[in-house]
Amino acid sequence: MLLSVIVPVHNVSKTLRPCLTSILQQGVRDCEVILVDDGSTDGSGNLCDLLSAENDRIKTFHKPNGGLSAARNLGLDKAQGQFITFVDSDDLLCHDTYRPILTYLEAHPHVDIAEFPVIVHYGNPKKEYHLTFHGEVYETLADYWLQGRGYAHSYAWNKLYRASLFYQVRYPVGRSFEDILTLPHLLL
């Protein structure tokens, strides 16, 4: 399996189907989508089961509500891909976001994380902005964190990771700012 896309799901029955459609239209056939229903009460869990029945690339796991980190961690435990990424269940991906990044990562085995541009707060005219990067390659944690301002865009969902990075790394359960707490461990 080339890519595992982990999608934590909690009470997102209105946004889940468009999110999944955007993931499945990435042009990456060797891909699994792992839906982790985190104790939804709005029918999202049933929708996950329905979507899994419609497409064999979608796998659904249910768990009692434990928060975003616990859902991501279960997805990591179930992931079979050589590469991992995360998508929030209310987000949309632009067409063909993943394929060129995966091609790059496969051609550059020394690169462990690739970060891609996103529109943050999409649809909110007062907050929306384009978070973009200029093809920088950082060789040290300090360079990425300080020169590249990694701390300002430490989101889990705008990166593709080699799965091996998560061998002994998980998201801290019950903590706020779990992305910024986890990314430095992955960078090390």
Image (cartoon, rainbow, N blue to C red):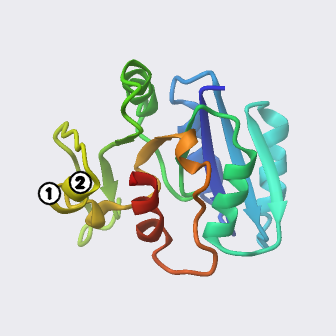
- Which of the 4 quarters of the picture holds residue 160? top left
Amino acid type, mark 2:
Tyr
Q: Is residue 18 left or right of 40 when viewed as pictured?
A: left
- Which of the 4 quarters of the picture holds residue 38? bottom right
> Residue 132 appears at what percent x and percent y?
22, 48
> Residue 62 appears at what percent x and percent y?
83, 60
Residue 147 disc label: 1
Mark 1–mark 2 distance (CA, rounded to whole Å): 6 Å
Amino acid type, mark 1:
Gln
Above or below for 59 versus 66: above
Closer to us: 22 or 140: 140
Closer to us: 144 or 134: 144
Closer to us: 8 or 188: 188
Above or below for 138 versus 124: above
Pick the quarter of the image with the N terminus.
Answer: top right
Pick the quarter of the image with the C terminus.
Answer: bottom left
> Residue 23 appears at what percent x and percent y?
56, 38
Q: Residue at x 41, y 21 (%)?
A: 103
Q: Residue at x 60, y 26 (%)?
A: 2
Q: Are marks 1 and 2 in contact (CB under 8 Å)?
A: yes
Q: Residue at x 29, y 45 (%)?
A: 117
Q: Is residue 166 left or right of 184 when viewed as pictured?
A: right
Q: Is residue 45 left or right of 17 when viewed as pictured?
A: right
- Residue pointed to by mark 2: 144
- Which of the 4 quarters of the picture holds residue 147? bottom left
- Viewer can see residue 128: yes
Closer to us: 153 or 146: 146
Residue 131 disc label: none
At numbered mark 2, what does the secondary structure look like: helix, strand or loop?
A: helix
At numbered mark 1, what does the secondary structure look like: helix, strand or loop?
A: helix
- Viewer can see residue 13: no
